[in-house]
Image (cartoon, grey):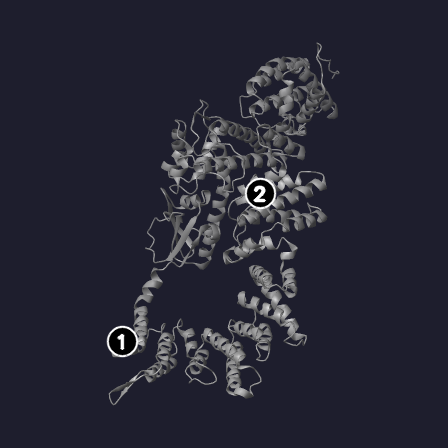
Amino acid sequence: MADPPAPEGPQEITADVREALTELQRYLSDSIAPLMVAESMTLLLDYSAELTAFEINAWTAAQFRSKMGAVPVSDYLYHAVDKIFQLGSYGLVPKERIREYLDELVPIVVHQCPEDDRDLLRTNLARLGEGDSTVASPVELLRRQVGSQNPLASEAGAAAGAGGTRDGLSQDDLSKKLKRFSMLLERWESSAGDGEKGAPGTDSAAGGPSGPRGAGGASAREGTAAERRKRNEALLSQLLSNAATGADSDKELAGALDKLRRIGLEMQTAEAFRVLGRALPGWVVPPGVEPLDQTGSSARGSASAAIRKIVTLPEDPVEVGKRFHEMLQAAVEQFNKGSLPRAAKMFEVAEHLIAEKRIDAAAVDVACRRTFDSLDLEKLRSLGEHPEKHPLLRKVLNFFPSLRVGALLDEVRMEEKRERRRLLLSLLEVHGTEARDAALERLHQMVKDGEAPEDEWHYKRNLLFLLRRVSRPAEQPAEKELTAVVRLSEPGLPAPLVKEALAALGQIKHEKAEAALIQRVEGLEQLLAKKGDAPFDEAELQPLLERAVTTLARLGTPTARRVVVEHALRKKGPLGDAAPRLAELSSQDLSTDPELVAFLLKSLRAELPFKVLGLVLKKSDERIVQIIEALASTPLPQVRKTLETVVESFPNQEFARSAGKVLAGFDTQHVQETAAASLSGDLELFELPSLLQSLGVSEVKGVLVLRDQKGNAVGSITMEHGKVRGAQVGILKGDDACYQFFERPFPGTFAFTKQDIPPRKEGDPPLREVVPLLLEGMRRYDEFQRSSALVPDDLYLAASGQKPTALAEEADAVLQQQIWARASTGASPRLCEESIPADSFRIRRLFAHWVEEGSLKPV
């Protein structure tokens, strides 16, 4: 084709215009996204259409020559005009200005087309806007005209139909993302008039009122400042997510962030990480649950995906390292505020980036050291006090080299300050089995190497403490541990070390541990019996004997109990008053050992007062009370009868009152056990996914009741043999009710009570496995956040006149009709959710679908 003529008429071409024309060519070649050319196109609209037509002609000529005529000129011209038209469809450039501009541009472009193809081009350009527009395919898969006769037209059309991709996004996905970004911008600007906008920075869960349906609707309807801030935080996070995941280069992201600055949001990448971090859900997938690609916060387009994209978009490794540090700093800030699940998710993203070698090793080291300095160690300690937090807390600890098991054990060995050692040991306890295994290996090696037991006894004591605090896995043999612990329990070693070893022996459920403890009790008794001849101070031996007897009692074996009873009922002597040590048996049911019970009852009767010549001879009331309390958990008939006799015979004695309390306990014990909640706690500590998974694994049967912060019951979930039988919240029941708890999380408490459940009836829904419900609930949470940012709770809408389309993902046609009937006549999403029995996600998704396609519009 001939070189294009220059545009007619004098027209000043400034540097800005030249840059705009260059960006237009890049956009026509799909080198940049529509969002990045919108500003340039807006500038070109102020100039004659001939200027743009000249650029289109030049671009067409270059494309035609590069393809050696394989695609007709008319298809390139159609592609160019259609791409400009799409900028109006996305709302990136005012639609009316685009249409007016095209009225001038199209005749010029048609004139540039070879004469034989002009009618076809004119017809197809006249049809622009009749169907759904999508982002043009890459130039190699040109958006062809209907009726193009080029031999390659059908082949290219088929390829385009398969859908090109960019960074994992289909063309249709990218189109929707760009359109949604534009609509979210409009939502943000429209909220200014309502006084809703404010500086981002609230640390609350995004989207919707605080709680599921009925859990705080009144306060939400009042439109408090906190609720407005929450809505804006959700809206801003979705703007950032759409901008980041839709960008194909760092320049595109910079352009999107620049648009936010123009509407009053100064958004550097460091602040973007903070906003996106606050948008992460307040939970993570529980350990042992394999997330699906589209589940929870791993979903493409979610806050975590946006965080990852912002870090990795730059080509400059220095800038990548800088952003990596900013992301870590945002994660630490979330942690220091107590948002452990959000922090853990951000550290998980960081771990993946490091594993994929997306960050320079030196930059990782610098970022870790700098962010570690701002980590709140007191928050580490307080979170470590909650065992249910340990799996998440380990994600944080393992990220920092100085908080890993080996480094912590090394520091414990050298640390002299007691408070610091206690912190280090509490962090090692969080590491669980890994820390226990490492501590045992070090302890075993120190004993095996022939080192004198008293050497480094402080360190050995700390290792023993760790073994005691972290339970040994059931499948792990005990012999290795026994060898070290028995050796360190020998009298004569430093007393604090021996006491720790004795306590550790008590937690090893093994016959050798029992034999070692009995041997220690007998050996200590013999040493005390020597009085002045003993090689050790009596004041030092007495506490060791008490520890040994107490530990032996807690083993709960018949042999151990008998040794404890025989020891405790001996008369005072060098052993001191040992009777108080019987108290360790008060919580144990001795019914399985009738001989021991008979011995205790005999001893009790022997201690009771008796009359001689009409005089009551008193014995030790204290010893009588101690024997009675030792039987407090043994409701055998003979025990009950003996205690009743004590109450009747000695009504005014202190020990009789103790016997009465034990008898009353027998009567109420069963009632209390059946009525008490089996598990209760704070929802923010346990997190619903982990709580439900725990109930599922335990295969329990009962009812989980969830309450708000005021103690009002919000809803319940019924469990049967570890599966979900049913749920209820507001007007919702079944699966929808389960999902609602995830979609609208709320702070509060829970209580699970084991109880019998009526048998299932024919026609009842099947029991549901917990894990699929968890995964689907977390997926719906993410989707609900995206939809509610675009269509908030109290947005009132009306039908625009455009015919609505059905949402393919929603199979219930009746539900779609119900919601459309209400939405099209002015009902807000919140009003629909309060009266239609479907979870918030399903209802809000339909609202967002109709708003995006234009069949619903705000009023």
Question: Would you name the residue on which mark 1 appears?
Answer: 652
Q: Position of residue 646 (x, y in %)?
A: 28, 78
Q: Residues within 10 Å of mark 2 (few under 14, many from 20)?
A: many
Taking 65 as reference, is 439 left or right? left
Which type of secondary structure does the marked residue at label 1 adopt? loop
Question: Would you name the residue on which mark 2 appears?
Answer: 304
Furthest-top residue in this view:
9
Taking 649 as reference, is 333 left or right? right
User: Where does the N terminus fall, quadrant-wise?
Assistant: top right
Q: Residues within 10 Å of mark 1 (few under 14, many from 20)?
A: few
Q: How far is disc 1 from disc 2 in space, using C-alphas?
A: 71 Å
**Mark sitting earlier along the chain (1/2):** 2
Please say if 593 is above or below 153.
below
Type of amino acid under label 1: Asn
Residue 136 in sight from this viewpoint: no
Q: Position of residue 269 (x, y in %)?
A: 63, 38
Please say if 140 is above or below 738.
above
Q: Position of residue 161 (x, y in %)?
A: 59, 31
Residue drawn 50% across the image and 32% down it: 790
User: What number of labels is visible?
Assistant: 2
- Residue nearest the viewer, comparing 144 with 569: 569
Residue drawn 70% across the image and 16% down it: 54
Residue 112 in sight from this viewpoint: yes
Picture quarter containing residue 582? bottom left
Please say if 117 is above or below 357.
above
